[in-house]
Image (cartoon, rainbow, N blue to C red):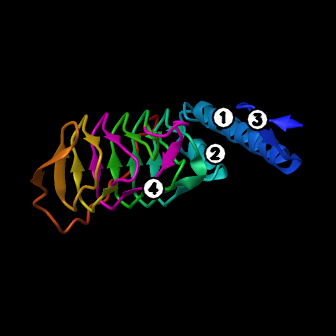
Amino acid sequence: MFKDKAGRELSTAEFFGKVINRFKSISLETSVYFLHLVGCFPSHTVRRFFYKMSGVKIGKGSTIHTKANFYDPRNVTIGEDSVVGEGAVLDGRARLIIGDHVDMASEVMVYNSQHDINDDNFSAINRDVIIEDYVFVGPRSIILPGVKIGRGAIVAAGAVVTKDVPPYAIVAGVPAKVIGERKLKTLKYKLGRARLFR
């Protein structure tokens, strides 16, 4: 009676399950679109309120600068005293955990979903991304699904991080490789106040 887009027959329960999933998807897409609009508003307080309402967990003193993009805000957790730069992409289709005192520069992209190029249906693979405390991620860096960036690590500008980064390592390049190590290991700094209209 009911068929999917591939022509396979669906039971009534499968059909209504698909209808419910479609409504959930439309609801999420509407929420994400609204967050894109909110992301341009020049007030950290207003943006933070709506981000929290949509499910983003944001710790004390943390800031997301303007024009941030989310794919599913409900799975994004940001610790205390962290800064996410302008135009960042925070995926959230799997868990995205950003620790305390993390400094992410402008236009950083963190993805935790990608397509399986060897799958007949080109299906998505979702994997968590964890960015530990005191990490610095340089501008226009890309962090791919399943990556863990260790405490105090540095990701150079424009790097594409495809695998785990050890604590205090400095990585650069495409794909990112270890090029050095951070000398200071007793990190206690605070990032401080965000700029007012960013």
Where the C terminus falls, by quadrant? top left
Residue 127 within the magenta-colored segment of the rendering: yes
Q: Is 73 on the left-hand or right-hand side of 196?
A: right
Crowding at mark 4 (Cα within 10 Å: few <14, some 14-19, many 20+): some
What is the secondary structure assignment of the residue under circle 4? loop
Residue 176 is drawn in which quadrant?
top left
Identified at 30% across, 38% down, the residue is 141
Residue 90's spot in the image, x, y percent? Answer: 47, 43
In contact (CB < 8 Å): disc 4 and disc 3: no
Q: How many numbered dots are placed on residues in this image?
A: 4
Q: Is 69 on the left-hand or right-hand side of 146?
A: right
Residue 57's spot in the image, x, y percent? Answer: 55, 57
Q: What kind of residue is marked 2?
A: Phe
Q: Nearer the viewer, residue 124 or 180?
A: 124
* Residue at the disc numbered 4: 128
Distance from disc 3 to disc 1, alpha carbons, whole Å, reads 30 Å
Which dot, 3 or 2, sits closer to the camera?
3
Distance from disc 4 to disc 3, alpha carbons, whole Å, reads 30 Å
Identified at 22% across, 62% down, the residue is 167
Residue 165 within the magenta-colored segment of the rendering: no
In contact (CB < 8 Å): disc 2 and disc 1: yes
What is the secondary structure assignment of the residue under circle 1? helix
Say if residue 56 shows up in the picture.
no
Which dot, 4 or 1, sits closer to the camera?
4
Region in magenta: 118-147
Q: Nearer the viewer, residue 30 or 68?
A: 30
Magenta span: helix, strand or loop, mainly? loop
Indicate whether 156 appears above or below 40.
Answer: below
* Residue at the disc numbered 1: 34
Can you tell which mark lies on residue 4?
3
Q: Nearer the viewer, residue 12 or 22?
A: 12
* Residue at the disc numbered 2: 50
